Image (cartoon, rainbow, N blue to C red):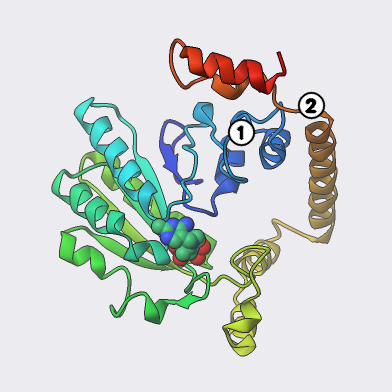
Amino acid sequence: MAALDERDWIFPALREGAAAMMRGLPLHVAIAQLIGNDLDRCRGRQMPCHYTFREGRYHAMSSVIGTQISHAVGAAMAAKLRRDDVVIAGYLGDGATSSNDFHAGMNFAAVFAAPVVLICQNNQWAISVPLSQQSASETLAMKADAYGMPSVRVDGNDVLAVFAATRDAVARARRGDGPTFLELVTYRRLGHSSSDDPSRYRDEAEVAAWEKRDPIERMRRHLESGGAWNKDHEQELQDRIARDVNEAIRVAESAGPVSPSTLIDDVFATPTPQLEEQLRFAIGE
Ligand SMILES: Cc1ncc(C[n+]2csc(CCOP(=O)(O)OP(=O)(O)O)c2C)c(N)n1
């Protein structure tokens, strides 16, 4: 995210909510989206975490794995046709490399030299499916070769390496030299979601080994060794975040329910009589 320019668009996969916040999505609006109340810009119509933030050029994520790859590439092709000087960042997980959209998206991106950076967070697991059952390729980065697209395989737990690789790929796209595929090698240490129990399908020793490579710890040590960070800064930051989150939850929870009148908004320019009737029924008129 830090390697992108503000004018660049983001097409997230499942785990880029922080990117929306970096672009300025207010925390209370993000929390209201989880609740689906009146402060939710999606008006309760989307699943949790599917924030949409147009002002921040952050497209809503799509639950359907892989589809955002075509969306990202399509947006990049459109930008090129319009001579719009933007780069598109399209995110995906390792599991998404098995989707049809991955192959279509990679091919179109390369053939049309679209200004897109496809950023694959290879966290080794797609829910309970390990990478070895997802792909027989030695790496995911090498798949880009077949499409004629440059790729870089990066230690995804090294923040500065990820920044450098992304910055180079964004510069290439901006110069008009087309797409890049980045494979960021990392690990999903927790469950896929809060309803998943990873102890049922993977070895705890593997999880423990990756714990030692925690990217946040690593960055912390790096900054501390250069004198740019210390325990006081850490405490201050933790306290500020706790205050901000608590305040955002308070504001989000104080909002009322979504107005029933929004039920038929944004469907047709002029609602059909059937929709009008349904609305009257819903609001009890
Ligand atoms: C087309 C499709 N198939 C299956 C699912 C169910 N599903 C939700 S997340 C997920 C795994 C995604 O794995 P990956 O792309 O590696 O992303 P990660 O969750 O590891 O970040 C699956 C299979 C889905 N959402 N869409």
Quadrant hosting residue 257: top right
Image height of 196 relative to 80, above or below: below
Residue type at numbered disc 1: Gly
Graded by Cα atoms within 10 Å as few (under 14), some (14 to 19) or many (20 or more), the crowding at tag 2 reads: few
Quadrant occupied by the C terminus: top right
Residue 66 at least partly seen: yes
Label 2 and label 1: CA atoms lie apart by: 23 Å
Image x and y of residue 86, in percent = 34, 33
The one nearer the camera, 126 or 170, is: 126
Nearer the observer, 8 or 37:
37
183 on left or right of 197: left
Q: Point out the tag, 2 or 1, that comes first from the N-terminus.
A: 1
Residue 95: x, y in percent?
A: 41, 66
Residue at the location (25% across, 32% down)? 78
Front: mark 2 or 1: 2
Give the x, y percent position of residue 150: 23, 59
Residue 67 numbered mark, or none: none
Secondary structure state at the residue bearing disc 2: loop
In the displayed structure, 42 sits above or below 164; it is above
Residue 161 shows up from this direction: no
The circle on residue 256 is: 2
- Pick whichever, 224 or 258, lies toward us: 258
Which residue is under mark 1? 24
Residue 117 % position (x, y): 34, 49
Q: Residue at x 59, y 66 (%)?
A: 192
- Judge from the rendering whether residue 50 lies leftward or rightward of residue 66; answer left or right: right
Depth check: give the residue in front, 117 or 28: 28
